[in-house]
Image: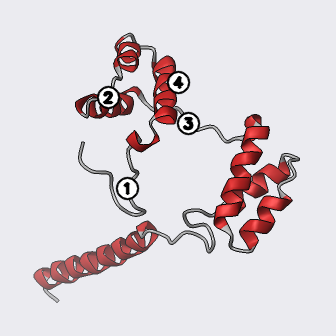
Amino acid sequence: MSKRSNIWIIAMACIVLSVLVASVYAEDAAPQAPPQGAGPGDMSGLLKNLTEKGFDVTEIQAAEEKGDKDSAKALLDKFFEAHPEAKPQMPPMDADRMKKIVSDLASKGSDVSAIQTALDGGDSTTAQKLLDDFFKEHPDARPTPPADGQKPPAQ
């Protein structure tokens, strides 16, 4: 064989090998479907966690197992009122995200000056508390999260 055909064979082998490796990595990166029953509104994981912590949530579990999501949600809300320490805490929001939300709220006419002042002063803990309080008073103002599998809108 000539030197030129050897180079050609090696180049083709490299291309085939590259395609095979890329296809293996592409399969690993494919989005996975959530486990069965773990979709939006599913509270089985939360209830399991509360049970493991020693809380009695059998009434809530029974409502959920019957498919009565409204009753289960109402019972869970009542449970958290009686046991606020059991309520899962949201992770703190980063200051840049809070600034974007506060800016959007201000542009819609909401009075968020106290939150803005805390952010401008570098006190993100106070800003987070004030923002949480604002959303408790104005639940319709909370930004809607994107649907599963979709990216948030460009900011």
Query: Identity of the amino acid at label 1?
Result: Pro
Q: Nearer the viewer, residue 14 or 153?
A: 153
Which residue matches tag 2? 110
Label ID, residue 16 = none
Q: Which of the 4 image quadrants contains residue 99?
A: top left
Q: Mark 1 or 2 closer to N-term?
A: 2
Mark 3: few/some/many CA within 10 Å (<14, 14-19, 20+): few
Label 1, label 2: how far apart the Cα atoms are: 22 Å
- Which residue is nearer to you in this view: 82 or 89? 82
Assess disc 2: are there few (<14), some (14-19) or many (≥20) residues with their C-alpha within 10 Å of its C-alpha.
some
* Label located before the other in sequence (4 or 3): 3
Residue 129's tag is 4
Give, as a three-letter code, the residue at label 2: Ser
Query: In the image, which is nearer the foreground, mark 3 or mark 1?
Result: 1
The CA span between labels 4 and 3 is: 12 Å
- Judging from the image, what secondary structure is the residue with disc 3 in? loop
- Rendered view: 126 above or below 54: above
Which dot, 2 or 4, sits closer to the camera? 2
Between the residue at mark 2 and the residue at mark 4, the CA separation in whole angstroms equals 17 Å
Nearest to the eye among marks 1 and 2: give it. 2
Q: Position of residue 71 (x, y in %)?
A: 70, 62
Q: Is residue 135 above or below residue 143?
A: above
> Mark 2 vs mark 4: which is more N-terminal?
2
Secondary structure under tag 2 reads: loop
Residue that mark 1 sits on: 146
Which color scheme does this rendered protein use? Answer: secondary structure
> What residue would you read off at disc 3?
91
Q: What kind of residue is marked 3? A: Pro
Residue located at (79% from left, 39% from top): 82
Nearer to us: label 4 or label 3: 4
Q: Residues within 10 Å of mark 1 (few under 14, many from 20)?
A: few
- What separation in Å lies between label 2 and label 3 (alpha carbons)? 24 Å
